[in-house]
Structures are given as structure tokens and as C-alpha cells.
Image: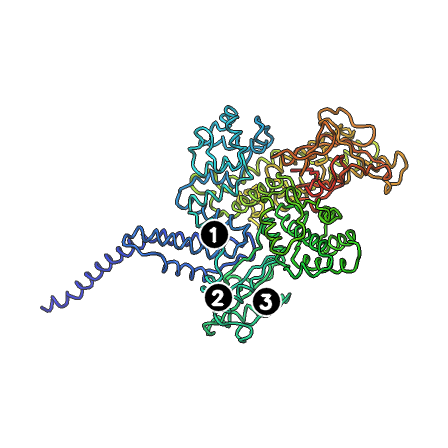
Amino acid sequence: MVNLLSEHPHMLVILQVKEAKVTEAKINEAREHYRPAAARASLLYFIMNDLNKIHPMYQFSLKAFSVVFQNAVLKAPPDETLKQRVSNLIDNITSSVFQYTTRGLFECDKLTYIAQLAFQILLMNKEINPTELDFLLRYPAQPGLSSPVDFLSNHSWGGIKALCGMDEFRNLDRDIEGSAKRWKKFVESECPEKEKFPQEWKNKTSLQRLCMMRAMRPDRMTYAVRDFVEEKLGSKYVAGRSLDFAVSFEESGAATPMFFILSPGVDPLKDVEKHGRKLGYTFDSGNFHNVSLGQVAKWLSTLEKKLEQHSEGSHQDFRVFVSAEPSGSPEGHIIPQGILENSIKITNEPPTGMHANLHKALDNFNQDTLEMCARENEFKSILFALCYFHAVVAERRKFGPQGWNRSYPFNTGDLTISVNVLYNYLEANSKVPYDDLRYLFGEIMYGGHITDDWDRRLCRTYLEEFIKPEMMEGELYLAPGFPLPGNMDYNNYHQYIDATLPAESPYLYGLHPNAEIGFLTQTSEKLFRTVLEMQPRDSSAREGSGSTREEKVKAVLDEIVEKLPEEFNIPELMNKAEERTPYIVVAFQECERMNVLTQEIKRSLKELSLGLKAKLTMTSEMENLQNSIFLDQVPESWTKRAYLSISGLAAWFLDLLNRIKELEAWTTDFSLPSAVWLAGFFNPQSFLTAIMQSMARRNEWPLDKMSLQCDVTKKSREDFSSPPREGAYVHGLFMEGACWDMQAGIMADSRLKELTPSVPVIFIKAIPVDKQETRNVYQCPVYKTRQRGPTYVWTFNLKTKENPSKWSLAGVALLLQI
């Protein structure tokens, strides 16, 4: 008996341990079933947390995410089968986090977020091939190829050839050449992303079809990616419905302020006041307060502390609403991270498109406004033309640099003050002072924002087209198919817009349809570049995606070091040159700058190479260099010493080698090349100035009384074997917004889908300013890159039979690089 008692506790413990192990095994097994839901939540958090790489306003805290996650778990539909319950959890967590995140993103960043979301979910589920995704994001097109078919550009063909290197796309190039007619029909269709690919290529996976589309129709990729996300995640992830303010308000609390990220011309206060009235909070009741802080940046840290103090122990109905405009650059961002992380962020953006903007401009007035002036006809016509002008200048910015060289904060105040000025001038003058009004609107009211001379010309041209005496004779068209309306009452003007304004197109802005193709292509490029930069650092090491990050970088590094030629021997070149003509001085300057650049390339790559071999400690500068090479970007230390360029690293390096080759040819005997590649210079202005200096020396003319005359020839570079007796032949320019009619020798409308056709060789010589032809010419700005603005080089006068205002509105420019 004593033995049993002494043994019994031991037996009991053994039984309990066995039971605990069984229970633990059951818990572990049950927990494993829920692991996919936890993994999805983790992935969503890290994607959300990476958004601050796009914009510093996008700050989210783990604490706020946890609340969203827990609410999603509670609201997920229950189910008797465990598998379905986990599936419900995953769906609800994903859509809740998606909603929470997207309401605080600008429209232009939402597609980036949902694309990253879809790609990362599919990678985690092993549903897509990482190598194919890498191609889609990186687009490593083979440079220097010529397209054998007329419906694909050289750049597109380079992409097709790169795709053919993968097993899944073998013989794609042969099929396109062999069935050119079928492929041409597909590529040139209006919405190819909705069409079936020719031949057996229609059976490829969704991602493989995206890769092919990326090469063939880059301008349609934003639509194609949206369709891809809808197919893989569901339509709720691409529906553009904005969340009701009341729904967001329910999620706020004393510890969770609501933060409105503002856009010009949008006021969220109306929504807050409206909802406040429903709940009994008004200014009059003394329980709703509006505090304007203006530009008080230094008080923000105090606000952050106060919000923290009041987050605990405050009345349950206490709420804080904050609004601020985002800064134009990351350096100018001053809003404390703590405020942004703990807030529910909501973006409010103005409507897009001419239709919405024209209605919105007219909404600033009413019937009383229309009746306030004694000169009713003139007042109403000019007011409507001003509304159209306002909508055009505000919405034109979507076309990027071809729209405006720089972005300007045009606002409704510009419009309402212009209408007040119009009223005062009409009341005070017996004749309509058109010139005075255009000057006030274009140089002061709207022009006050404008800092670029070419943008000022554009603004002035619009007003010259919209506000002139012909408007009173019923002969004025604000856009093709949209005549200026006659005398109507206020509601009829709104109805007139609905009934008469043509569908949204670049024509409404005076632009060619190619402007939209260019804008959509650049939007797609930016989308993929941003998603590529957001890829997890170890993503390239995933199985199936080939070489690792380090191996890829090492391969590029070795290729650059191997192909980069020796530096120019400046003392030797100086001994070779007999005299210092303006052209030879330019050649020396270019060689010196090229040496500075190539020395930096060699130095930084040698350092990185030692770092990758673990012979040197990796510094942050070396890591940035490695990252740039991996992302096919030109490293910062190189761009500081280089010429302006918007190319990726591979194309940039090929271009660099061509520039060196050009300089080597020129410096062999210093005789001017038969046709000079103007884009090949670090400083093209110096060469154009040298043309004037040579002429000034020869004829003893004062330099400040000279200008350049540009004659576009009917020949290409190969047709010239020697330089002209005076001046120079230059080649390698492209025209954006129009094209050059070689037969007629004048500017002409662009051909559809030919965004930047090349221009024949131009003969440039210096002449006295008073001999410059000013009739039937368009003063065409020349820019180094498509970014325009600060890349301005010179103005070339080009022959035209059309009114030059047509080309100003179309944003026509010559570009040295595309």
C-alpha cells in the first residue's frame, strides 16, 4: 500500500505529460492550418510598410495594422470546414488591409500598390515564374537591333529578342515575321489587352501574355496590369469607388485621428461638417472647432505630443481631423512620422478629364454671376472661354513635359479673380479691351505661377486662340467639334457641355493623339520601375529566377570594366592640334569631361569589385552602387559627372561608348566631322556657340548681333562626305508633337504611333540677327531629353505653312535623346 502511494504521484505525472503532449500536438496541427492566414498578413504588412519609398506621406504603424488585422479576423465569415474558414480569413484580411491602405494613396500610386500586392501574393503561392516577372519589371531589351516589321519599333523588337532567350518564348520572333499580317492586326488594335494573341501564343499564361504585351504595346500596360489583377485577385481590387466618409469615421477614435492628404481645388472640410451636423457637432454648438495653422511647421512636434497625450483617457467622442498638402519633394516633407502612422489617411483628389473639369470650373459661378454685367453677351462668352481655358491648363499637366515643362498650382482662385477683373474692365470700357484682358489673365493671374518661358508662350497662345473679337461673331471653336456657346442661362451652359463636348482626347487640348500614347507609355514605365524597386532584396535568390543578385551585378560590372576604353591623353592631343579654333576648344572640353566620368566609373567599380570579394568593407556608397546596377539605373556618382539622360544603365552605357567613339574619330586629326552628332556632347550649347564664334572671327562680326539659321536638308547622315564651308551639318535630332515632311520641306502633323520621328540632317550656320527669317516659321525649342524644362539647349526656327500657334499648343519640340 505504501509502495503504491509512493509510486502513484509518479504515474500521475507521466499520464499528465502524455496528455499534454497529445494536446500540444493537436494545437500545433490546428495552428499549422492557420499559418497561411498569418503568412498573408505578414506579407501585406511589409508591402504596406514599403509604400513610403513612393511617397513620405505613406507611413503606417504596426499598431494600426494590428487593429485592422484583428477587426478583419472578427468580421471574417465563420465556416464549419477548417479549409474554408482559413480561406475566408485570408480573403477578409487581404481586402480589409487593401481598403485601409488605398484610401490614403493618390490615384497615380494605387495601381503600383495593387500590382505589387498581386505579384507578391502569386510569388508566395508559387503561381508565377520569378524569371518572367523579372523580365516584365526590368524589360532587358537587346539594344541596337533593327525591327524587321513596320508595326514594331526597334525597342519593341529588342524586347521580343530578349524574350526569345527563354524556353517559353522560343520562336516568337519567327512567328511574328512569318505571320506579320495577323500580328500587325493584333498590335495595332485599339485595346490589344482585350484581344486574343495570334496562333498558339493565345494559350500562354496571363503573366507570359503581359511580358509579350510589354514589348509590343507599352502604352496599354496600365490597362493590361489592371486586367491581370482583376483576374487573379478579383474585381473589388480594381473598382475605383471611393470610400464613404462615414465608414472611415467609424474606424476613428480619440487615439486615431483622421488625416486628409489634400490636392489643389479639393476641400474635405465640407464632408466633416456635413457628418458633424448629423451627429450634432457644429460651430454654433461650440463642440466643433476649426483651427487654421497655416504654415506653422515648427509647431508640428508639439501637435504630435498633444495627440499622444490625448490618445488615452479622453472622452470617447473626442476626434481630431488634420489636413495638409503633400510636399513636392521628399526633402521638403515635414509632417512627423508619428502623426501619419497613427492616423487614418484619406486622399481627396479633383475629378479628371475635360468634362469633369469644365463642369467644375463653371460650378464656381451661378445665374447671378451671369447677370451681374451690363455687357451680357461679351461677359458670358469670355467667362465661358475662361472656364474652358482654366480646365485646359489644369488638366494638360497629365501629359507630362509635353503638356507643361513644369508643374504649376493653378487653382480656382485664378479663375474667380480673372472673372472679377473681366467684370471691372467691361464695365469701365466701351470696347472690349481684348489685349489688356489677355495680358492680365496670361501674364499676371495665371502667368504669376509660370516660371518657364516656353510655358508662358503656351499660356499666351491659348488665350490668343480663345479670347479674341471673333468670339462675338459665332465663329470660334474652343476645340475641334466644340464651338463657343452663345448667350444662355447658367443651367443651359452645363447642359451644353454634356450635349456638345466631344469625348476625352488630346485634341481637346490642342495636342496630337500621340501625346496620350507617350503619356501612357511613360506611366507604364514608371509603374514597372517603382514595382521593381519595391521587390524584396532577396527576391532574386528565389528558386527558379536564375542567378543571385550579386552574380547579376558582377556580370554587369565585369562587362563595363572590359568594354570601357582608355582615357583621352589630353597633353598628346594638345600637341597634335595646330591652332585653337572654337571647334577644337569644344573637342578638348568634351574629352576632359569624358575623362572625369570614365575615371569615376573605373574607381567606383574597382572598389565595388573588392567589396563583393570581401577584400573591402562594403560602405553605403558601394551598396547604393550595387543596388543601381541591379536595378539597371545609372549610379548617382556617375550621373553627377555625366550628361543628362533618362536611359537605363544598359542603354546609357551603349550610348556612352558611342560618344567616346565619336570623340575619338574627331580628335584623330581635329577636322570637323562631315555631320556632327549634336546629342553626343556633354554641352551641345558650346558647339552651337562655336559655330557663331567661327563666323564672327571670319567676318569680324560682333557675337551678340548674331543668331543661328537652321535649314533642314533632304538628306541623312550617310549622304555627307565632308563638312560645309561654313557652319556645320548636325544629325541625330528627333521631333515630338509633329513630324518633318521631307518632300515639302516643312513641319507636318505627326503620324499615329510615331511618337518621336527622326529629323533629317540640319544645316546650321551663323547669320546677323537682322537677316533672320521670322515669317512662316515656328520657333522650336530644342531639349536634351524628353524631360524638357531645365534640359533646354537652343531655339531652331523651322519652316511651317500652318499658324505657329498650332505647334505651340501641340507642344512641338526637338529632342536630342529619346
Q: Nearer the viewer, mark 3 or mark 2?
A: 2
State the image coordinates of residue 113 (x, y, percent, origin top left).
50, 50
Left or right position of 380 against 96? right
Q: Of callouts 3 and 1, which one flags the residue occurring earlier in the amino acid sequence?
A: 1
Compared with residue 700, is residue 311 higher up or lower down, i.e. above or below?
below
Residue under the image location 85 percent in, 39 percent down: 769
Q: Which residue is the site of mark 2?
A: 256
Query: Which of the numbered marks, if any, corresponds to residue 47?
Result: 1
Q: Residue furthest right?
A: 700
Q: Of callouts 1 and 2, which one flags the residue occurring earlier in the amino acid sequence?
A: 1
Amino acid carrying mark 2 in the image: Thr
- Quick one: quadrant of the C terminus? top right
Left or right position of 80 against 678? left
Q: Which residue is the site of mark 3?
A: 300
What is the CA distance from the residue labelled 3 to the residue labelled 1?
A: 28 Å
**Could you say whether the residue bearing mark 3 is in a helix, strand or loop?**
helix
What is the CA distance from the residue labelled 1 to the residue labelled 2?
A: 22 Å
Figure quadrant of residue 122: top left
Compared with residue 734, is residue 451 higher up or lower down, i.e. above or below?
below
Q: Is the residue marked by circle 1 packed among few (<14), some (14-19), or many (20+) residues within 10 Å? A: some
- Quick one: quadrant of the N terminus? bottom left
Q: Of callouts 3 and 2, which one flags the residue occurring earlier in the amino acid sequence?
A: 2
Query: Which of the numbered marks, if any, corresponds to residue 35?
Result: none
Amino acid carrying mark 1 in the image: Ile
State the image coordinates of residue 683 (x, y, percent, origin top left).
74, 40
Q: Nearer the viewer, residue 183 or 301?
A: 183
Q: Nearer the viewer, residue 73 or 403?
A: 403
State the image coordinates of residue 99 (x, y, percent, origin top left).
46, 55
